[in-house]
Amino acid sequence: MSKIETDIVVIGAGPVGLFTVFEAGLLGLNCHLIDNLDKVGGQCIELYPEKPIYDIPGVANQTGKEHIEALLEQIKPFDYKVHLNQRVNEISESAENTWKLVTSEGQEFKTKNIFIAAGAGSFESRRPPVMEPDKFIDKGINYAVRDISKYKDKEIVIFGGGDSALDWSVELAKIAKKISLVHRRDDFRGAQHTEKKMRELVSAGLIDLKVPFVIKDIIGEDKFTGVDLMHFENKEIETIECDEALFFFGLNKQLGPILEWNVDLENNKIKVNTANFETNKPGIFAVGDINHYPGKLDLILCGFHETTLAVQEAFKRINPGERVPFGYTTSNKGLQEKLKVNK
């Protein structure tokens, strides 16, 4: 493979990585994005494509999938390339304040700026503690809702006590034939207002709350037919026949090769300053959920702010001594030409 030279290499093609393309494009910089998933979108696509997002400024309600589609539409005018199904294995310093990156596919990059927008790092859903948990994966067993229509008029058992379990219990109760929510205790970790909605639906008979229960086994020979539950206290077994089971036990998160890149870490996150979100390594920035600083909030909108400031510093590294051009997209004709919105 030929070596690729670019202004910015973005590790991670989730919302913050995609918005980096937009901010870089406004300053005339090009980007190459690398992601170990087989599609762009990060956790928004992999874990909750159909889940509504309510805290994107100016957008009252948008699913994870819709959010990624909107970001892709927004960056259409700009110069970027995406490299999927590979991860960055090596990062090393080169001459002239540049960095060399090598991916798992052997692709080599040369750049002055690396943006780590890897979300929580490498991740996979935690499996239930049963034999062959993936025997019926996508055929009755799932760890994320990727197509909400799949659950219409179905009998569904949902496991978990966090936001995902609560959110989807409430959301799928609108279309499912029956919802059973299973948790080992009558105490939930999710948002209080969602828990309140869930309990209102339990009172209305639209959700069957099964506490304190845990998964004992997944039932089925040639096809999935249901689950065995065990009462957490008296150990009695109860069988529930159902069409679908959703397990929301959280994620196993791993930083993977990031641990070998010699960037300073704190609590398994990358430490950055708040002036430009640069790490202890000049030219390596960390934006979005992967970074840490005093007052950090793991919100998409915070990642947008972080990468906006980081791109300013990236421009300075490419164009030393030059003033960073600044303008408002509402009135700057040069920016409007880049966005292809001039009439």
Image (cartoon, rainbow, N blue to C red):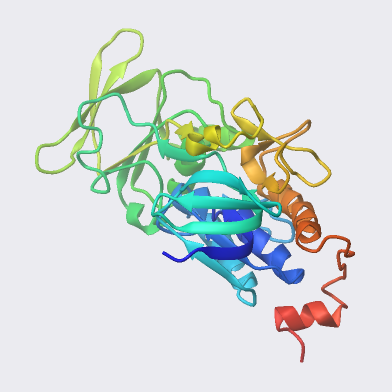
Q: Position of residue 149 (x, y in %)?
A: 37, 58
Relative depth, front residue between 131 and 168: 131
- Determine if residue 307 is in view: yes
Image position of 252 with respect to 116: above or below? above
Q: Residue furthest front?
A: 95
Foreground of the two, 127 or 307 = 307
Residue 179 position, x and y percent, is: 37, 39
Please state the horizontal and vertical placement of residue 225, each as a whole percent of the image. 18, 39
Determine the residue located farthest toward the bottom in the rendered image: 343
Q: Is residue 242 left or right of residue 144?
A: left
The quadrant in which the C terminus is found is bottom right
Q: Report the number of discs.
A: 0
Residue appearing at x 51%, y 48% in the figure:
43
Q: 60 or 173: nearer the eye?
A: 60
Say left or right for 88 vs 332. left
Observer-nearest of 210 and 219: 219
Occupied quadrant, residue 261: top right
The answer to whether residue 198 is above or below residue 343 is above
Residue at 83% from the left image edge and 60% from the top image edge: 320
Residue at 61% x, 33% y: name it: 262
